[in-house]
Image (cartoon, rainbow, N blue to C red):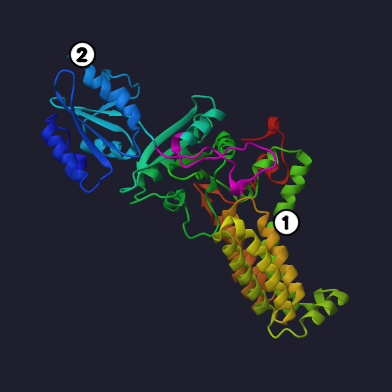
Amino acid sequence: MSTSEKTLLTGKLIEDEATLRTTFAGCSDVIFHSFHTACQTTALCVYCVGLCDTDRLERHVLEPLMGMKRNTEPTQVPMASSKTILALSQAVQAVMEGQALILIDGEVPGTLYPLYQVPSRTPEEPAAESTVRGSRDGFTESLSTNLSLLRMRIKTPALKLQMRTMGEYTGTQVTLAYLEGIIDPKLLQEIEARLAQLKVQDVLESQYIEEGIIDQRFSPFPQMIATERPDVVTANLLEGKFALLIDGTPFSLIAPVTLFSMLQSPEDYYQNMFMSVFVRWLRYIFYALSLLLPSAYVAITTFHQEMVPTVLLLSIAKAREEIPFPALVEALIMEISFEALREAGIRLPKQVGAAVSIVGALIIGQAATTAGIVSAPMIIIVAITGIASFMIPRYAASIAARLLRFPIMLMAGTLGLIGVMLGVILIVIHLSSLRSFGAPYLSPATPTSAQKLKDVWWRPTQENKSR
């Protein structure tokens, strides 16, 4: 336990000020303002410039204190959320959060006034989770704004918000949200225990917390949903899940999740039922293609040419007759180049990122085909694979397919379709053993739940949707 955590405010202003000045030594943005109250008592105001609203501090706190009647307590100043503290650690943390600390000589408890003035942006539609139909607001970096967006949608006291501080240096506020009466009590106890045991020095993004509380850290498959959309969090809370909202990042975390929930979009429930079912099945098919299509092409063209119709086989052979590399090397070259172009498009400024990635893919693909490095069928396979990966609603789920694509291609290039099937079997075994806060990752397929399977192969209406 640190010294500040054990130290209490003494009520002697000279000693408390000296302790605070030592703690904030080198912090030029922390202001110490000494003044006298109306009853000529020495007082001290401590606040952080940029985080504390100095205009409200002057009007609503300092002026009433300096002009108040004799024997008036500082908590009588008209600020509804003011509170008293005794520990020095609480005072330091509050000042760093943007509150104003008032210490009066002879008064043991200090008084905190929540005069936050933290820079924040207005809720906007998330760029990474755009939708044709649905809400257009999104979470911001401000935790209070995010909680209000959640409260705006769930107007019931059953929505519980448990707040805690994480990070030795960042002091990040983390809120656990759940619906009492819907969430499984065992799940609630599990997440509370994991958060209590989590020890992190700093929390700059939700991933810092996610890595410390998930079941299998080294699995490529995501075990929590990261989203910027309040409607997604609301829908999952109504299904009995929990959410973690972290101050300083617009991405909230949702669990438990399954493989099928990672492939579902919130827009599935906002549009026509039959169109939603069609798009959902299309998404399942293309997710499998994004994982297996290059491997299947390599295996068939290398070991199983008899599976290809004669006309198509002659066309592929003609396109590959001048290619100096085997199909495996050709596929690896194109896939790695495509991933590099995709990453470059993300890192470049938005004004030129999309243009560079598209033009780069066209130019490199055409030049590679003309130079005889890769064949035209391979360009088509890589393009279809890329489009398939873009159809996955959750970016983290697409990362798993992108990573696993390469080892399966290597197995296909050495063992043919037997290698592809072996890779699929290993993935299924891993998914069968994977858990997300105790929930099987392949549920409701295995273990099978006929009621919940309706929301996998079909899109139930709201009145018969299971929770």
Q: Secondary structure at mark 2?
A: loop
Q: Secondary structure at mark 1?
A: helix
Per the rendered image, the range of residues in magenta is 118-144
Q: Residue at x 65, y 45 (%)?
A: 265
In front here: 287 or 98?
98
Residue pointed to by mark 1: 285
Q: Could you tell me how far apart the alpha carbons at marks 2 and 1 are, in whole angstroms?
A: 75 Å
N-terminal label among 2 and 1 = 2
- Asked if residue 299 can be seen in this view, the reply is no
Q: Is residue 13 above or below residue 442?
A: above
Of tags 2 and 1, the one toward the viewer is 2
Q: Quadrant of the C terminus?
A: top right
Picture disc at residue 69: 2
Does the magenta-highlighted stretch encompass residue 122?
yes
In front here: 314 or 198?
314
List x then y, in percent, for residue 423: 62, 68
Q: Residues within 10 Å of mark 1 (few under 14, many from 20)?
A: few
